[in-house]
Image (cartoon, grey):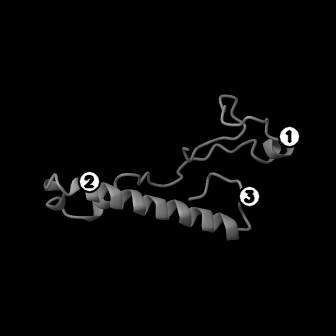
Amino acid sequence: MPQNFNIVDTANTLFKVRPSYFNQALHFSDKYKNMGYRYYGKILKNTTSLELWANPLQINMFSRIESMITFLFEQVKIIKKTYSIAHSKDATNVN
């Protein structure tokens, strides 16, 4: 799900039940900008040597490591939401 997701957007078809009016009022003007760097798929390429990526046999292993690192980042965002007093528990825009 993209980070600039707006819960009130009329093109939003992810909900099977309409969000409550209270929820819509809270998130009426959530047009977030500058939510950070899109790091998916680029973490290891930007931090390791290009010589490691020259071997085609290791690309599969690096892509698995990349997906594990991305998974860890997403889990940290969930932990941040759990203990944050500034975000609601169903917020999707946590950087």
Residue 46 picture quarter: bottom left
Q: Amino acid at mark 3?
A: Ser
Give the amino acid type for the residue marked by disc 1 in the picture. Answer: Tyr
The mark closer to the camera, 2 or 3, is 2
Q: Secondary structure at mark 1?
A: helix
Q: Nearer the viewer, residue 35 or 10?
A: 10
Q: Residue at x 44, y 59 (%)?
A: 70
Secondary structure type for disc 2: helix
Residue that mark 1 sits on: 21
Residue at position x 41%, y 61% in the image = 68
Label 1 to label 3, Cα distance in Å? 16 Å
Sequence-wise first label, 1 or 2: 1
Q: Residues within 10 Å of mark 1 (few under 14, many from 20)?
A: few
Screen quadrant of the N terminus? top right
- 84 over 9 or under it: above or below: below
Amino acid type of disc 2? Asn
Check disc 2 and report the residue beneath it: 60
Identify the image quadrant of residue 19. top right
Residue 48 is situated, as x and y percent measured from the top left of the image, at 24, 64
**Residue underneath mark 3:** 88
| Residue at image location 47% in from the left, 60% down from the top | 71
